[in-house]
Image: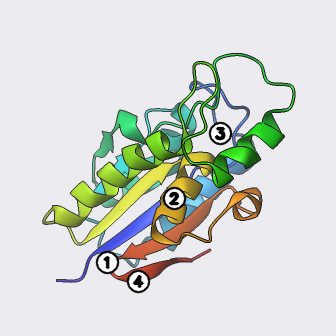
Amino acid sequence: MSKNIYIVRHCQAEGQPPKSQLTEEGLKQAKELAVFFSHIPVDRIVSSPFLRAIQTVEPLSKESNINIEVDDRLAERTLSSVDLPDWMEKLEATYGDLDLKFEGGESSREAMDRIVSVVEEALESDAENIIIVTHGNIMSLLLKNYQESFGFEDWKNLRNPDVFLLKRGVVPFRLT
């Protein structure tokens, strides 16, 4: 049995808080994403609890009549609970030191372990085609887990939305 795990970064959103909605462009992108996946016999859809992630996959869920499973482990990584004016430099440092952790945040390794556990469970399930909807930073850490060279510059080049395909034993590759 072939397993296909489609990792989707949410569509364009109005902001970063958990309740941020998709923009008008993001809603259009979500419909286009449903068309993109229309030829694939999707078995499961798993999403971050953040509204923008759920809205990204709602058109596909309705078209395919597959319920969205919400998994808190797919929520975006918290870099810190305090304002970091130099957050971009701090984020970059966490790609070089996976255990670096800032006040009230989680390290890259902690976030990576969290999302990898979702993917590993999906690989062990009976479903063949699984869509997992998440966020840019945690998605980049998942990709880094399977392709060590994936780093900060690759994160900066992610798009909204973005789709990568994971297969056991194969380096992840971008589909969009």
- Cα–Cα gap, marks 3 and 1: 32 Å
Percent of width and height locating residue 154: 71, 65
Q: Closer to the camera, 151 or 18? A: 151
Select label 3 or label 2 by which is in front: 2
Q: Are marks 4 and 1 in contact (CB under 8 Å)?
A: yes
Q: Is residue 65 left or right of residue 94?
A: left
Say if 25 sits above or below 158 in the image.
above
Task: Please give the residue where the numbered disc 3 appears in the rendered image.
Answer: 22
Q: Which mark is residue 93?
A: none
First in sequence: mark 4 vs mark 3? 3
- The residue carrying pointer 1 sits among few (fewer than 14), some (14 to 19) or many (20 or more) residues within 10 Å by Cα, namely few
Q: Closer to the camera, 82 or 24? A: 82
Q: Is residue 52 visible?
A: yes
Q: Amino acid at mark 4?
A: Val
First in sequence: mark 3 vs mark 1? 3
First in sequence: mark 3 vs mark 2? 2
- The residue carrying pointer 3 sits among few (fewer than 14), some (14 to 19) or many (20 or more) residues within 10 Å by Cα, namely many
Q: Amino acid at mark 2?
A: Val
Q: Which mark is residue 168?
A: 1
- Cα–Cα gap, marks 4 and 2: 17 Å
- Cα–Cα gap, marks 3 and 2: 15 Å
Q: Is residue 62 visible?
A: no
Task: Please give the residue where the numbered disc 4 appears in the rendered image.
Answer: 170
Q: Secondary structure at mark 4?
A: strand
Task: Please give the residue where the numbered disc 2 appears in the rendered image.
Answer: 8
Tell me the residue at 67%/54% (across/down).
96
Q: Closer to the camera, 24 or 92? A: 92
- Cα–Cα gap, marks 1 and 2: 17 Å
Q: Amino acid at mark 1?
A: Arg
Q: Secondary structure at mark 3?
A: loop
* Quadrant where the image shows the C terminus: bottom right
